[in-house]
Amino acid sequence: MQGWQNILQKSITRAEDIPARFGPYDNGIAQAAGVYPMRINPYYLGLIREKDDPIWKQAVPSIDELRDQVCFEDPLNEENLSPVPNLIHKYPDRVLFLVTSQCAMYCRFCTRKRKVGTERMLITRETISAGIDYISKHPEIRDVLISGGDPLLLADERLDEILSAVRAIPSVEIIRIGTRVPCTLPMRVTLKLARLLKKFHPLYLNTHFNHPVEITPEAAQACSRLADAGIPLSCQTVLLRGINDDPHTMRELMHRLLRIRVRPYYLFQGDMTRGTNHFRTSIATGKEIMKSLIGYTSGLAVPTYAVDAPGGGGKIPLLPDYVTADGDRLVFANYQGKICFYEDIKQR
């Protein structure tokens, strides 16, 4: 079996390297890849069944990326919320710590599309040290989310160094890792890696699957190794036009996630990131999908639907409308449309 590093080295990075079975060379792909880098490793490429299917759309550049005049380079205002490079301190008690600029596959809808995989995202030992120093000097930070790029693309030894440094800070209670590796390069999750991560409990892992096709035997094995190491797994899915924006696909995805021991966590409305406007759906679409889940399947399979507010406003939950009257008596329609009542209690 090939090592994950060898698989990654064989990634497609140019339009002309896309297999001929997908049709003739497309100059639009090349143009988009010239602005926003492309990387599709052989494993993820193997999930594509035909041009423009849900996997293709996530991985292969499109000329639509260059036609976006609606969205913003830095929609979440991360650069202005960074007291030191590559560390975002948006919420009072937690930070987002970026430790690599590389991913196993460059998602076309990436929030950090402006810099991931490019020289514009400069991460060095010095920037990482500065981030660790900042965390240690701010005891209000109790939760550190390590992301990038994808931190699981770091060598085991380097990942061990970073996690050890963060875990050594007394005020840090929990560590989270944000990674799409279990989906895009699951063979990276070796038994050795699982043993390494196990040392840093309480440690949580947020992964990212968007379509049922991505849940393969390889992905299931990767998640099993992590879960067996005692690491709680959750999924942050993005609502994407033409990929998962229908109730059947989303319900099937949520059910398959639970079967591989991954808890649906967030369903995100697409960020207003420059180059991604063609992926965005209406919020009404998202609410209808949530109505197709709530009550019709286990609460375990129902993520929180949210929008990450532009400008750094943070995550705002979005819920379907069930309440029809709100006073001393709450009147609402349940998931089947049945009218129900709840007598409120007056605050003293």
Image: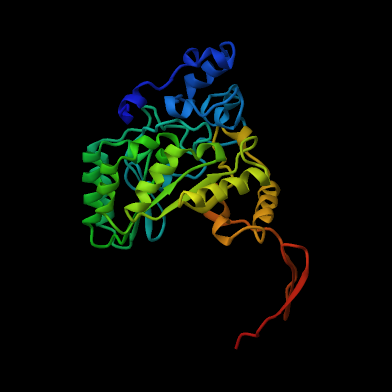
For the C terminus, the image quarter is bottom right
Residue 300: x and y in percent read: 54, 59
Front one among 4 and 304:
4
Residue 184: x and y in percent read: 44, 35
Q: Residue at x 48, y 38 (%)?
A: 216
Question: Where 85 falls versus 228 (above or below)?
Answer: above
Which residue is the extreme one toward the bottom?
A: 348
Front one among 23 and 127:
23
Count the labels in the image: 0
Question: Where 178 falls versus 348 (above or below)?
Answer: above
Residue 311: x and y in percent read: 52, 47
Q: Residue at x 55, y 31 (%)?
A: 55
Q: Is residue 311 visible?
A: no
Asked which quadrant contains residue 279, the reply is: top right
Q: Is residue 154 visible?
A: yes
Question: Where 264 falls versus 116 (above or below)?
Answer: below
Question: Where 140 falls versus 258 (above or below)?
Answer: below
Q: Is residue 293 left or right of residue 59?
A: right
Front one among 226 and 157:
226
Residue 53: x and y in percent read: 61, 28
Asked which quadrant contains residue 21, the reply is: top right
For the N terminus, the image quarter is top left
Colour setting = rainbow
Q: Residue at x 63, y 43 (%)?
A: 249
